[in-house]
Amino acid sequence: MADSDIRYYILFANYEQGLALRDLLLAENIPNRIAPAPRAIQGELSCGMSLLLSPGDVDAAKACIDRHHAPYHAIVPLAGQIKSHRDKYC
């Protein structure tokens, strides 16, 4: 599997933490998007929200988290979750 198939998910205890970190990342021009937390990595967290990062943005996101002491649960790599052909009907 190619590195381009790996996405990084930032997991949170609650959605307020996720939205706050999203604002910090956007302020520092670090690309991210809100995504459902994949069930395979959600574990016992009740929050189903995650922030999705590309591999090249992980270090910048970690630096932003450290600078702002932003709360989060984990950053987890997971391959094969984005399928470009899914939900196309034509």
Image (spheres, rainbow, N blue to C red):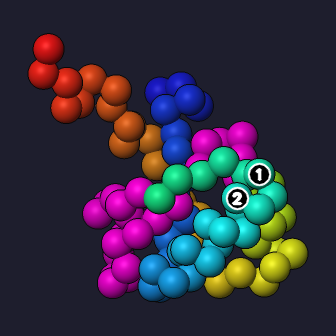
- Helix, strand, or loop for circle 2? helix
Residue depicted at 37% across the width and 79% down the height? 47
Q: Residues within 10 Å of mark 2 (few under 14, many from 20)?
A: few
Residue depicted at 36% across the width and 42% down the height? 81
Q: Do the residues bearing badges 1 and 2 touch, measured as CB atoms within 8 Å?
A: yes
* Residue 4 vs residue 85, the one in the foreground: 85
* Residue 83 vs residue 15, the one in the foreground: 15
Residue type at tag 2 = Leu
Q: Residues within 10 Å of mark 1 (few under 14, many from 20)?
A: few
Residue 10 coordinates in the image, percent (x, y):
55, 65
Q: Locate residue 4: give its quadrant.
A: top right
Residue depicted at 41% across the width and 57% down the height? 35
Residue 62 coordinates in the image, percent (x, y):
76, 64
Q: Magenta stretch: residue 90 in it?
A: no
Q: Is residue 44 left or right of residue 32?
A: left
Range covered by the magenta-colored residues: 35-58
Q: Magenta stretch: residue 36 in it?
A: yes
**Which of the numbered marks, if any, corresponds to residue 81?**
none
Residue depicted at 46% across the width and 49% down the height? 78
**Which of the numbered marks, if any, corresponds to residue 29?**
1
Residue at which label 2 appears: 26
